[in-house]
């Protein structure tokens, strides 16, 4: 392992990168105190008496501040998610279809959101990056292990889904705050540039139709993963409210 003296002799940006790396590793308490002292110097904080022990949260804060202070981009691979729920989980008869999304990051983001909101399944088109793509796996944070996931054509999905409810998250639809969500069903998401194709939209229009998110700023659209998160929260809330009323 590099010595503190050698670390201090590195060019500042290289030193910041090295410190960010070392702060992720277990190390001798005295060495850790030296790392903390250097890190705090580099971000302009008072060093004081650098502690011999540092919580994982405090290490993460130092790494983040070094990255911001020195303009160091942090790769997706370096981000660490909170621990998974250890208790019982709730699932709903909900599924999502990804129609030719381009970004593996968005695929993983949708998978993580779907699992977190209790969806049972995620289906994706033949030209959507698979969930085992490295970037999709990273952004999914293990969610794919808890979802029924499958890649198939829209025609095969329609044949398998049958007459169960289907709707589209798409511009020009019913406001999400007024939409009558089904108790079970499939929501379809289109690609980042082109949206859903005509066949998918026709399928939705013959079933539960289209739902849209009201926007009020200059931007007329949201990232597909963010938009799905808003939709998923609204759907599960609606479902839980209806179950409570019926109960």
Image (spheres, grey):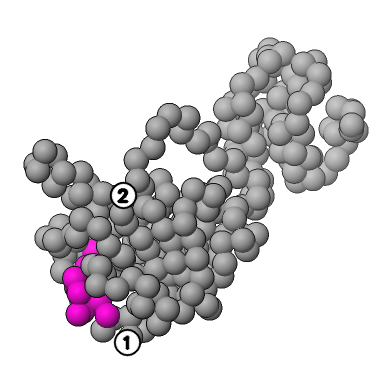
User: How many numbered markers are drawn?
Assistant: 2
Q: Nearer the viewer, residue 107 or 5?
A: 107
Q: Going 61% across and 21% down the picture, which residue do you hit?
A: 55
Residue 90, which numbered label?
A: none
Whole-percent x, y for residue 72 in the image: 66, 50
Q: Nearer the viewer, residue 154 or 47?
A: 154
Residue 11 versus residue 76 in the image, above or below: above
Residue 88 versus residue 215 in the image, above or below: above
Q: Are marks 1 and 2 in contact (CB under 8 Å)?
A: no
Identify the residue under disc 2.
92
Q: Nearer the viewer, residue 153 or 8?
A: 153
Question: Which quadrant of the figure contains the N terminus?
Answer: top right
Q: Going 36% across and 78% down the picture, which residue do you hit?
A: 159
Whole-percent x, y for residue 9 in the image: 88, 36
In the rendered structure, the answer to whether residue 117 lies left or right of residue 41 reads left
Whole-percent x, y for residue 140 in the image: 53, 52
- Is residue 177 at least partly visible in the picture? yes
Identify the residue under disc 1.
198
Whole-percent x, y for residue 149 in the image: 49, 61
């Amino acid at each position: 392992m590099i010595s503190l003296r050698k670390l201090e002799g590195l060019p500042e940006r290289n030193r910041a990168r090295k410190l960010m790396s070392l702060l992720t590793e277990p190390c001798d308490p005295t060495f850790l105190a030296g790392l903390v002292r250097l890190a705090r110097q580099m971000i302009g904080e008072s060093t004081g008496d650098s502690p011999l022990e540092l919580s994982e949260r405090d290490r993460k804060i130092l790494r983040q501040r070094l990255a911001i202070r020195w303009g160091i981009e942090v790769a997706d691979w370096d981000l660490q998610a909170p621990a998974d729920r250890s208790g019982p989980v709730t699932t709903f008869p909900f599924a999502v279809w990804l129609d030719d999304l381009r970004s593996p990051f968005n695929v993983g983001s949708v998978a993580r959101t779907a699992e977190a909101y209790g969806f049972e399944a995620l289906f994706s088109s033949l030209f959507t990056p698979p969930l085992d793509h490295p970037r999709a796996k990273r952004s999914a944070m293990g969610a794919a292990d808890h979802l029924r996931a499958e890649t198939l054509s829209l025609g095969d999905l329609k044949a398998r889904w049958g007459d169960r409810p289907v709707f589209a998250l798409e511009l020009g639809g019913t406001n999400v705050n007024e939409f009558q969500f089904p108790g079970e069903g499939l929501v379809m998401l289109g690609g980042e540039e082109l949206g859903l194709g005509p066949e998918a939209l026709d399928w939705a229009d013959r079933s539960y139709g289209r739902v849209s998110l009201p926007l009020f700023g200059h931007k007329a659209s949201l990232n597909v993963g963010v938009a799905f998160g808003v939709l998923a929260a609204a759907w599960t809330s609606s479902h839980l409210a209806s179950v409570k009323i019926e109960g």
